[in-house]
Amino acid sequence: MLLNMKELLKVAQEGKFAVGAYNIGSAELLKVAIEECETNNSPVILAIHPSELEYLTDEFVEYAKERAMRSPVPVVIHLDHGGTKEQILRAIRCGFTSVMIDASHCSFEENVKITKEIVEIAKPLNVSVEAELGTIGNLGESHEGGASEIIYTNPKKAKELVERTGIDTLAVAIGTSHGLYPKWMTPKLNLELLKEIREKVGIPLVLHGGSANPDAEISESVELGICKINISSDIKSVFFKTVRETLKENEKVMEPHEIFAKAIVEAKKVVKHKLELFNCIDKAKMY
């Protein structure tokens, strides 16, 4: 069941749960995300970053769309951190049902201008638009954007951005970073700020950099109005750690299904844990 983000998150907001957006940089990672969500009767967002799309090619999106339409659970195919108009147009032509335009590094007025232009292109085509205000941190290991310094989302500016652009979802900066946190760093969400943003913004809110944050904070953020949470590093770290172990145990193995089988199982456990935190299990029945 292929939906756009507005349709998907309207139900999530009303039902007080969040949907995971899992970066699918390979067929194996797509398999991890969609199969575990189907097992738990949970909606799912298949996120593809422009650099991932460059590697996967447009043809991979056809496979993802076919898999989504055959799925018994709601599925969105989402462009993660589109940085240019050209990247957005490519995603729309490929059949993505949702796009993110990330102009968060620009001035506020430039962010409004760029985002509004993308909304005017996408909305008539039934493609949802996500924007970002403030900056998500980047711990140096992620290709999904972010900045060396976190700039928190201003609640008043968030309200203005939504009103002036007509976006469907807003990614907020409340203390997360892309990538995995080093052992000496403790991630911390500013939940009081989230409450302020929620009071001023009516559309679904998005949390980027959701890997490695404390479970209790993630669960509370969902209770406070986060409807979409991006997960990439937590899954990839487990997946490729298991792949390395498999290759080390048997250096002669060369069949893909033998190399990836155990990694897929282990990565699915991470997805299942996230679904529990997001209060997302069995929520496909609400669509």
Image (cartoon, rainbow, N blue to C red):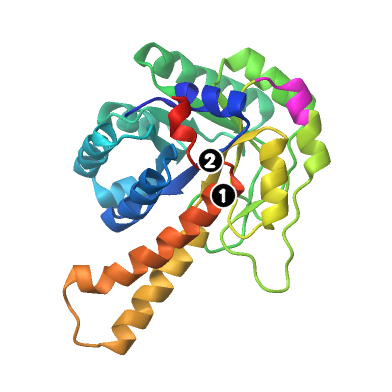
Answer yes or no: is residue 173 visible.
no
* Towards the viewer: 151 or 168: 168
Q: Dominant secondary structure of the magenta stretch?
A: helix
Three-letter amino acid code of the residue under disc 1: Glu
Q: How many marks?
A: 2
82 within the magenta span:
no
Range covered by the magenta-colored residues: 197-202
Residue of label 2: 280
What residue is shown at x 70% (from left), y 42% (from top)?
221
The image shows residue 270, relative to residue 220, as above or below, that is below
SS at mark 2 in the image: loop
**Category of crowding for the residue at label 2, using alpha-carbon neighbours closer than 10 angstroms: few (below 14), some (14–19), many (at least 20):** many
199 within the magenta span:
yes
**Category of crowding for the residue at label 1, using alpha-carbon neighbours closer than 10 angstroms: few (below 14), some (14–19), many (at least 20):** some
Three-letter amino acid code of the residue under disc 2: Cys
What residue is shown at x 24% (from left), y 88% (from top)?
251
Could you tell whether 61 is left or right of 226 in the image?
Answer: left
The image shows residue 170, relative to residue 55, as above or below, that is above
x, y percent for residue 192: 83, 39
Residue of label 1: 276
What residue is shown at x 39% (from left), y 30% (from top)?
88
- CB-based contact (under 8 Å), mark 1 and mark 2: yes
Q: Which of the 4 quarters of the picture holds residue 64?
A: top left
Q: Which of the 4 quarters of the picture holds residue 128?
A: top left
Could you tell whether 13 is left or right of 195 in the image?
Answer: left
Could you tell whether 144 is left or right of 46 in the image?
Answer: right
Label drawn at residue 287: none
* CA separation in Å, label 1 and label 2: 6 Å
The image shows residue 287, relative to residue 79, as above or below, that is above
Could you tell whether 287 is left or right of 173 in the image?
Answer: left
x, y percent for residue 235: 46, 60
